[in-house]
């Protein structure tokens, strides 16, 4: 009697598309019910001893599969690979709970209150997706109140993209930031010396007058004169003195009366005044022998470039098809420039039925698309668009 298999021509390989999701969901249910757990992670608050932390019974194979940090711990022959109880000190319990949940579900919930702690924890545990999601979350929420704090945060963790985004935001809003002073929790005066020098050296500062840079430099020095005073010459080196005009003479003379200037760089300011308004134009400022400070020699670039804001132009922008670059026309010179469309990168541009553009009083260009709820702001220094938070 012939078998049914005699009529088959070959084998088939099938894949249950729901299997991986069902498996992950079942593992999560085991974790929630504390079933089949073979390792307990104790997260101890810094300064507390063992036995005082919060316990997380987990499946070590799930942690090792989802997290490079635990993979090294449990499969790399470390002491913890044979232990059923592991103690961790450099992460807070709330963040660890979110990250363990991510290991089991692939989902993570971010908020203004937890994003920085989650970034630090995911950076330590080498969870790249969560780390980048936190960085993107911070970038989309950059504003005048938090930009310097985010710049410092990104610099501390070495996240180049977020640092660059925060730096660009600071440069674009430098004038407003220079006027806000101590009314903010974090200001330009809270930057480290290296961070301040990086910002003050930018060509992309959106300012109309170099006096704004000098004002911020003085603010920073006066915030901690004893500690920062010796760095006055290095800070003032970032000021492009050749861009000061006759209208700035009174301001420069006023700097001579400030204690921080008198003590550390009086000769420097006198040299600036002589260079700008004296009979001789100096290419460098050399302190006089009787100066109270011996570290005030500051070289002056012969033709330093103007800051971005000093080169601002009035433009007419033409918006056409959402996927095509926008055209920018200079009515005075007749020059035509192109601006990329933020909609080009969207996967479903065909679903966009209309777009709207507006310009703020600060000359920021915003673009919104319908029926999506996306909103972008144009970054002229990078000739690119930044998507804003929902």
Image: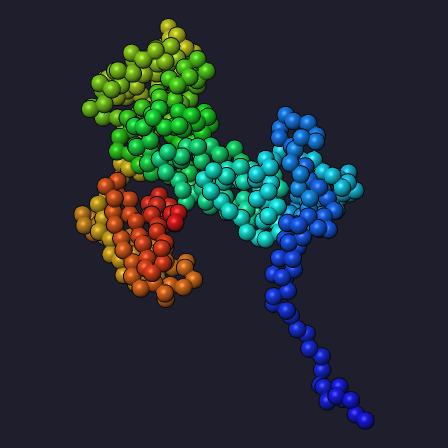
x%, y% of residue 264? 39, 13
For residue 94, side relative to residue 229 (left or right):
right
Residue 330 position (above or below residue 220): below
* Camera sees residue 96: yes
x%, y% of residue 243? 27, 28
Front-lying residue, 81 or 100:
100
| Residue furthest to the right | 1
The part of the image, by quadrant, that contains residue 198 is top left
Front-lying residue, 167 or 23:
23
| Residue furthest to the left | 332
Front-lying residue, 150 or 41:
41
* Camera sees residue 78: no
| Residue furthest to the bottom | 1
Residue 130 position (above or below residue 209): below
| Residue furthest to the top | 290
The part of the image, by quadrant, that contains residue 91 is top right
The residue sitting at 71% across, 85% down in the picture is: 9
For residue 119, side relative to residue 12 (left or right):
left
Q: Quadrant of the N terminus?
A: bottom right
The residue sitting at 35% across, 45% down in the picture is: 379
Front-lying residue, 33 or 110:
33
x%, y% of residue 363? 26, 43
Q: How is the image coloured?
A: rainbow
- Report the number of discs: 0
The residue sitting at 66% across, 73% down in the picture is: 14
The residue sitting at 47% across, 32% down in the picture is: 152
């Amino acid at each position: 009697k012939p078998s049914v298999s005699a009529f088959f021509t070959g084998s088939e390989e099938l894949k249950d598309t729901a299997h991986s999701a069902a498996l992950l969901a079942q593992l999560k249910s085991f974790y929630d019910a504390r079933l089949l757990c073979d390792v307990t992670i104790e997260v101890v608050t810094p300064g507390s001893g063992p036995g005082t932390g919060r316990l997380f019974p987990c499946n070590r194979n799930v942690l090792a599969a989802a997290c490079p940090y635990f993979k090294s711990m449990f499969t790399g022959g470390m002491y913890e690979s044979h232990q059923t109880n592991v103690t961790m000190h450099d992460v807070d319990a709330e963040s660890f709970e979110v990250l363990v949940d991510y290991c089991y579900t692939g989902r993570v919930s971010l908020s203004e209150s937890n994003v920085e702690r989650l970034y630090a924890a995911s950076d330590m545990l080498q969870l790249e997706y969560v780390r980048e999601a936190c960085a993107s979350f911070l970038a989309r929420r950059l504003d005048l109140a938090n930009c310097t704090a985010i710049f410092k945060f990104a610099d501390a963790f070495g996240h180049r993209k977020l640092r660059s985004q925060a730096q660009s935001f600071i440069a674009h809003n430098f004038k407003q930031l220079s006027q806000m002073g101590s009314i903010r929790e974090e200001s330009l005066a809270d930057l480290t010396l290296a961070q301040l020098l990086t910002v003050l050296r930018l060509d992309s500062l959106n300012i109309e007058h170099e006096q704004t840079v000098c004002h911020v430099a003085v603010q920073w020095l006066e915030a901690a004169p004893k500690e920062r005073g010796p760095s006055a010459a290095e800070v003032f080196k970032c000021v492009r003195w050749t861009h000061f005009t006759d209208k700035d003479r009174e301001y420069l003379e006023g700097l001579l009366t400030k204690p921080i200037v008198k003590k550390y760089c009086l000769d420097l300011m006198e040299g600036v005044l002589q260079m700008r308004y004296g009979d001789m134009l100096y290419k460098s400022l050399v302190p006089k022998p009787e100066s109270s400070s011996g570290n005030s020699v500051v070289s002056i670039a012969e033709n330093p470039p103007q800051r971005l804001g000093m080169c601002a132009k009035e433009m007419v922008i033409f918006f056409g098809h959402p996927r095509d670059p926008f055209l920018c026309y200079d009515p005075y010179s007749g020059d035509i420039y192109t601006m990329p469309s933020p909609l080009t990168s969207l996967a479903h541009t065909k679903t966009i039925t209309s777009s709207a553009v507006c310009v703020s009083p600060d000359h920021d260009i915003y673009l919104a698309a319908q029926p999506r709820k996306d909103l972008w702001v144009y970054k002229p220094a990078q000739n690119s668009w930044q998507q804003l938070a929902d």
